[in-house]
Image: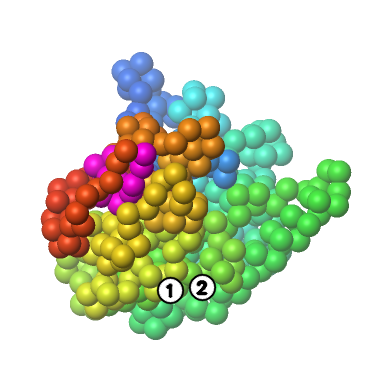
Amino acid sequence: MAKLSLRDKLAILSDAAKYDASCASSGAAGRDSSKSRGIGSTEGSGICHAYAPDGRCISLLKILMTNFCVYDCAYCVNRSSSNVPRARFSVDEVVALTMNFYRRNYIEGLFLSSGIIRNSDYTMEEMVRIARKLRLEENFAGYIHLKTIPDASPALIEEAGLFADRLSVNIELPTDLSLEAFAPEKKPRDIRRSMGHLRAKIEEHQGERRERAKPKRFAPGGQSTQMIVGADGTDDDAILGRSENLYGNYRLKRVYYSAFSPIPDASAKLPLSKPPLMREHRLYQADWLMRFYGFDRQEIVSGGEGGMLDLAIDPKLAWALKHRERFPVDVNRADREMLLRVPGLGTRAVKRILSTRIHKRLRLEDVARLCQSIDKVRPFITAEGWSPGAATDAAGLRQALLPKARQPAQLELF
């Protein structure tokens, strides 16, 4: 086999990394390639946008160290039996790529994952070497997110946390039964053990930060995970139940949902077509409601068809239409918890409403200036000089709002 150039490796291993949703890819294009050839030229390969722990949107080099893998997970395009082009970066090549991209201001950090080569410890050790070399030899102060290998030794994972801003352990599928069916070489208990170990180390170092003047940093961005949606028959209620468990038991910063994408030469156990992309979007919105809006999972999915979220309208609007007796809400008197349940009001809009009404009584036009779209809000509120008038039945209101509900919105804005 002909030796691959660094550019060829980048093309293969950045494309292979696109299936990992744990940093939200935007498909950012590269700069003018006629003026920027060589290692520093991205040509659209490997650059994704993600959010740092402090909320900043940053550009990352998103790659696999290798797409060789000893596992044969049915849902993975890089499984050992898959007929795909293979490549592998050396430790020095990943370090050089990262620093060259960083110096050219293409990226602000690195998102590194990998197939399993030889064994879990060997793979994890190589990834840790990359992060260590970036931090200690290159003095790299940018963002680093490492995908950890669940059954790697605790000592290696602990070392990874000293160099990475965030660590993640993928649970892959929503249920243990599905994981055992599609990826029998992976053990759910190993994944849970790694998550629990990470939680303990993160909390231990958080305690040290309070006690020491100069504590060691350990994965200050916490840990996250990813699950594939639509590869098995798990409904949205069960998926959100799993997320609820992960947030509660392991203090995860984020659960990422990735719509299953059919792969070449797939197992007969897998579906032939991908689920609606809107399903992934609705799960993110429901996840947001649980974490930032005070909703319980049962409230979000109750009344849905077979435990599934409504694809036509967002889950907050679906809840409001089922509970018309709770509306309209007086924006000049309602507490924060109830304002957060008004369709069309996001967390920032509610914060602005609460701070503004201290100084004046809000009229409808005031609310319009504070939120993204007053059309969605109007039927659910009263304000100074404004009332929605005769109550419209839920079916009629749903029909009236349906065209606007189909327009994608930022996840945090409802």
Image: 344 above or below 316: above
Quadrant location of residue 41?
A: top left
Q: Which residues are magenta?
A: 374-384
Q: Measuring 44% from the left and 68% from the top, which residue is drawn there? A: 296
Q: Residues within 10 Å of mark 2 (few under 14, many from 20)?
A: few
Q: Residues within 10 Å of mark 1 (few under 14, many from 20)?
A: some
Q: Which residue is mark 1?
A: 241
Q: Which residue is mark 2?
A: 245
Query: Along the horizontal axis of the image, is 214 left or right of 91?
Result: right
Residue 399 rendering spot, x and y as whole percentages = 13, 55
Nearest to the observer: residue 365 or residue 401 = 365
Nearest to the observer: residue 72 or residue 171 = 171
Nearest to the observer: residue 75 or residue 125 = 75
Residue 92 rendering spot, x and y as whole percentages = 57, 41
Residue that sits furthest to the front in the current view: 385
Quadrant location of residue 144?
A: top right
Q: Measuring 81% from the left and 54% from the top, which residue is drawn there? A: 208
- Real-space Cα separation, disc 1 to disc 2, in angstroms: 6 Å
Most common SS among magenta residues: helix
Please report contact status of discs 1 and 2: CB closer than 8 Å, yes or no: yes
Q: Measuring 24% from the left and 78% from the top, which residue is drawn there? A: 306
Image: 94 above or below 84: above
Image: 31 above or below 341: above
Residue 236 rendering spot, x and y as whole percentages = 32, 71
Q: Name which residue type carries label 2.
A: Asn
